């Protein structure tokens, strides 16, 4: 299997990190727009849906959950000549816990599709007025083939 190469501007990554830090401790969600050519994905834009009020510290709604978001981002992609190539959401942690890995739910949502999955981890220490950013980081994950289990004798 050939490696997947993803090109994305630092501005897109930093803009999403800022949103994730501001929203802590609720997850934030966005959609990557760009072009896919074989195993190369070029991310050119980031679409952030409005009204993410149903997001919690344990999950974010996605374009697979909300048909209106899916329709809106597909229309936006068509108007810009780009395509939907993936998505990104934040994971919120209190120090020292942290992880930039997708959850099983994240993997199941993209399994078998050529999709770039972004995880933005935000780690805070303290609470209330004493809350301070410990660190924030983005990791992009390529698609993986779907695994179908077959048990033999």
Image (tube, grey):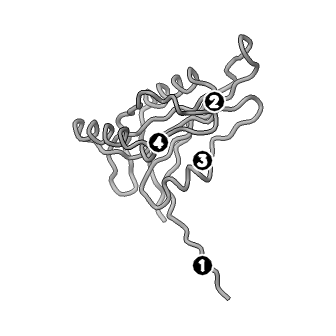
| Label 2 crowd (10 A; few <14 / some 14-19 / many >=20) | many
Disc ID at residue 137: none
Which numbered disc, 1 or 4, marks the residue closer to the eye?
4
Disc ID at residue 62: 4
Residue drawn at x 46%, y 30% is 10
Residue drawn at x 63%, y 30% is 122
Left or right: residue 60 compared with residue 94: left
Residue pointed to by mark 2? 122
Q: How many labels does the image show?
A: 4
Residue pointed to by mark 3? 102
**The C terminus - image quarter:** bottom right
Work out how far the residue at label 1 is from the one at label 2, CA to CA, in angstroms.
38 Å
| Label 3 crowd (10 A; few <14 / some 14-19 / many >=20) | some
Work out how far the residue at label 4 is from the one at label 3, CA to CA, in angstroms.
14 Å
| Label 1 crowd (10 A; few <14 / some 14-19 / many >=20) | few
Q: Which of marks 1 and 4 is nearer the N terminus?
A: 4
Quarter of the image holding residue 99? top right
Q: Which of marks 1 and 2 is nearer the N terminus?
A: 2
Instruction: Identify which residue, 148 or 12, lies in the foreground.
Output: 148
Q: Earlier in the sequence, mark 1 or mark 3?
A: 3
Quarter of the image holding residue 72? top left
Residue at the farthest bottom position: 153
Looking at the picture, how far across and down is residue 43, in whole percent?
38, 40
Work out how far the residue at label 1 is from the one at label 3, CA to CA, in angstroms.
24 Å
- As helix, strand or loop, the secondary structure at mark 2 comes to strand
Work out how far the residue at label 1 is from the one at label 4, CA to CA, in angstroms.
30 Å
Looking at the picture, how far across and down is residue 1, in whole percent?
49, 65
Residue pointed to by mark 1? 150
């Amino acid at each position: 299997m050939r490696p997947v190469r993803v090109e994305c501007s630092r501005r897109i990554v930093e803009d999403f990190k800022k949103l994730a830090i501001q929203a802590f401790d609720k997850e934030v969600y966005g959609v990557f727009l760009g072009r896919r050519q074989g195993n190369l994905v070029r991310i050119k834009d980031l679409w952030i849906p409005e009204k993410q009020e149903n997001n919690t510290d344990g999950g974010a709604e996605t374009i697979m959950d909300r048909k209106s978001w899916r329709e809106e981002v597909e229309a936006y992609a068509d108007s810009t000549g780009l395509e939907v190539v993936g998505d990104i959401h934040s994971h919120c942690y209190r120090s020292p816990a942290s992880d930039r890995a997708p959850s099983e739910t994240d993997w199941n949502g993209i399994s078998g599709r050529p999709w770039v999955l972004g995880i933005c981890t935000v780690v805070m220490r303290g609470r209330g007025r004493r809350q301070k950013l410990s660190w924030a980081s983005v990791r992009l994950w390529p698609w993986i083939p779907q695994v179908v289990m077959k048990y033999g004798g």
